[in-house]
Image (tube, rainbow, N blue to C red):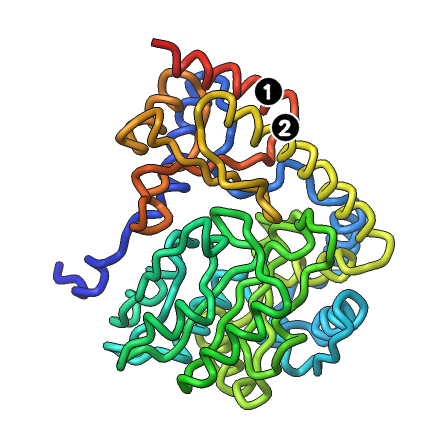
Amino acid sequence: MQTAKRTRKLTSFKVVDFLEAARRLEAEGRDIIHMEIGEPCFATAAPIVEAARLALDQGKTAYTPSCGIPELRHAISDYYRQRYGVTVDPERVIVTTGSSAALGMIFELLLNPGDGFLLADPGYPCNANFVRRLDAEPQLVPVSPEHNYQLTAELVNRHWQANTVGAMVATPSNPTGSVIDRDQMSELYRAVASQGGTLVVDEIYHGLTYTAEPLCSALEVAEDVLVVNSFSKYFGMTGWRLGWMVVPEAFVDLFTVMAQNFYIASPTLSQYAALAALQPETLPILDGRCAEFQKRRDYLVPALQKLGFTVAGLPEGAFYVYADVSALTDDCEDFCWQLLNEHGVACTPGTDFGEHRASQHVRFTYTEPLSRLQLAVQRIERALQP
């Protein structure tokens, strides 16, 4: 059968490749330590699960409005007011089938074939494929520790091209865990706006930060940005497949039409469960889990450094360590497959996250319990022995 040429440009999501390989080994009876997938190891918090059970008992299993149940859109609006001091009209909140649906629709809205979009390299790999899917050009901008692994106003101005229509950043970022402060976000927004472009901000890991100062939302800087968030990471609802975006008022009707056509509505039970995720009694549970992630980070980073990995400072958020392995191997993919197949540790090669020095890096997650991370370090140490 004939297939669309654009599909040949898509790249595999190596995180999932390694996860599926790890699951196959587990099915054979192997013990695998999962440091590849960005998934909190905690079970979904009890109040969230109970809310879903109640919704099921009440027969809330029908389609909802395409942009989400009004109660949830209002609750998300309240969340921005309470956490960030930002007033967001609930009508600007679009509930989506995971943040992936939000990202897909945003690029559908902004890109024509041949357009370009600036993305940090390294960065979340699916973003480039969302752009390629539209016969547009992912314009990868190399970022390094000296940039805190983030796009800056200077980089935007330097790399903006005639076909560029926007830029995207993530704070905290995947795979590095770096963040963007308020002043940097303001400068970045002004740089993109001065070029006539649109700024998209991934805030999926908000709530999972370890900095002294609270992390700002891009919505504190401007209203005409597109902000994406998710119930997967901080809220611990990965399998519930629920996210949201906050969009300029002028785009609401367009996103409504896309939601109606692309997925009809987000999962109903997940939406009622998410109402409980935003309640005052649930948030302390989630913040306690964030504190546990910080303990795991504080163990793992120095442990890896002692083994010869180079890590450019402690990650400021998320639950990833982006480690330079150039002193240990010249083939990060072979290194990761060896760790998995021979030593039972699953991690992700840097080649999943872009092109800039990608083969010199691997990404470790620290979502597993501390005892499992300690075992992983022991296994990695054995793998490195001559």
Image x and y of residue 83, in percent: 77, 65
- Quadrant of res 129: bottom left
Disc 1 target residue: 374
- Quadrant of res 75: bottom right
Image x and y of residue 89, in percent: 70, 83
Kindly identify the residue that appears in the image at 31 percent across and 50 percent down. Answer: 356
Marks 2 and 1 close (CB-CB < 8 Å): yes
Residue 275's mark? none
Q: Is residue 38 above or below residue 306?
A: below
Image x and y of residue 254, in percent: 49, 85
**View extreme (bottom): residue:** 250
Kindly identify the residue that appears in the image at 52 percent across and 60 percent down. Answer: 170
The crowd level at tag 2 (other Cα within 10 Å; few <14, some 14-19, many 20+) is: some
Disc 2 target residue: 299
For the N terminus, the quadrant is bottom left
For the C terminus, the quadrant is top left
